[in-house]
Amino acid sequence: MSEVCTQVLQAPPGWPEPPDPVVWRGMAGAITETIAPHTEADPLAVLAQLLVGVGAIVGRGAWMAVEATRHHPNEFVVLVGDSAKARKGSSWDHVERVLQRADSSFATRVHTGLSTGEGLIWAARDPQGADPGTPDPRLLVVEPEFVTVLKATGRDVNTLSPVLRAAWDGRPLALLTRTAPARATAAHICVIGHITRAELAHHTSAVEAANGFLNRFCFIACRRHRLLPEGGDPDPLAGTGLEQRLGAHLAGARRGGQIALDPAARLLWHDAYARLSETTEGLVGSLCARAEAHVLRLAMLFGLVDGESVIHPTHLRGALALWDYAARSAAWALRTTTADPLAEQIHDALSASPQGLTRTELRDLFGRNLPGGRIEAALATLGAAGRAQRHRAATAGRPAEVWTAHSRPPATTEPGSRPARRAVPQGPERSGGP
């Protein structure tokens, strides 16, 4: 193929700092690096989805033990685009082709339409009576419109949130209905979602952040990374042997059994564990509350891609770097939301009134049916987030308290993060072979 005509796009202001280049080491980095020049998609979107897809192929045959808990290589990731043109779908197309060639049965286990917990259990159900059940309970759910999942979990009668939480934990799933009971005792569920930043900020609720649903996901900020007016090589991995090597590694990984850290990785893990265990207040802190578990699963996935039965320091460093980027991504994506529905309603009203609203006008907005303390708390939340400010306006009597909206809150950083050493504007760089 002739040389690719490409224009690399610079990151917009405020974009999360890229991860440490260690994320590009090993076979996962080699595959991503080979694809990157031939797609407009973000290399990090390719890498993250590749790791999740690998976990879906490996299934429950490999795991890490933490006390009495087994962590299998099932991970949830959501790609958060700065707009509808972030090329999230293009990134998945490349990953899907790689995984289909690595495992010929992969396509039969990819699903979409995640709307109810009952539907998810049914897709991975055990045999029962005349029902043969699902022959292979390894499922990868790809949701190009992840906003529909957030809307579904916001409904009181919907069971999707608790079922997905149990699925990420690797616990048996059960549908206890009188007419069609179903169980999925060996379900291995992986999830990839795509959403825009505005959708995520608007539909993230404090309940889902607090109950542990959203912190079971890694959020990866992704953007259009380059312009390819004539497109890239439609099959950039042809002739590299990478897909065949990946397939051989994953076939062995399905029988990998317990995966452990090697001695050097254990020392690194002891140093990193305290930082990952730090608690941080606020919405982003809630979303990063499972940092330790995510890092272990990502490290396991990096190792399995390389065909290893133990986790080496390079795998753990790659996982730490990718998690740090995920935490930065969550902070970037959600810095414009409080996850307090009342605060968001008030902010919308303030944004629609450039001259501002007084306390009386705010009470009138809700028909004077809300306690003053509730409105006070919502305004305090907006003020602390830098999304609204209070002024004093002169009147014929006592000065009036007027609130106005800030359209751009101050930039925030994620909890416990470390700045990346350098940017990688051209895509991933390999630093050592697989």
Image (spheres, helix red, strand yellow):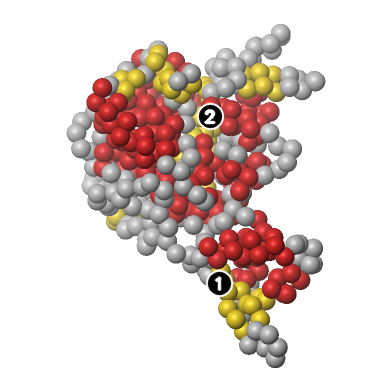
Q: Amino acid at mark 2?
A: Trp
Residue 434 position (above or below residue 418): above
Q: State the SS at label 2.
A: helix
Depicted 138 relative to depicted 217: above or below: above
Residue at 73% x, 75% y is: 360
**Viewer-proximal residue, 432 or 332?**
332
Looking at the image, residue 303 sits to the left or right of residue 361; the answer is left
Front label number (2 vs 1): 1
Query: Which residue occupies the extreme left position in the image?
Result: 432
Q: Residue at x 47, y 31 (%)?
A: 75
The residue singled out by tag 2 in the image is 168
Relative to 252, residue 370 above or below: below
Task: Residue 362: give its label.
Answer: none
Instruction: Please indicate whether residue 55 sits to the left or right of residue 317 in the image.
Output: right
Q: Secondary structure at mark 1?
A: strand
- Residue visible at 60% across and 70% down in the picture: 351
Residue 170 horizontal/vertical position (percent): 53, 23
Mark number, residue 389: 1
The image shows residue 60 at horizontal and vertical percentages of: 47, 18
Q: How busy is the neighbourhood of tag 2: few (under 14 within 10 Å), some, or many (20 plus)?
A: many
The quarter of the picture where the C terminus appears is: top left
In this orientation, which residue lies closer to the viewer: 317 or 107?
A: 317
Tell me if mark 1 has few (under 14), some (14-19) or many (20+) residues whose alpha carbon lies within 10 angstroms of its own.
some
In the rendered image, which quarter contains the N terminus?
top left
Percent coordinates x, y for residue 27 in the rendering: 28, 30
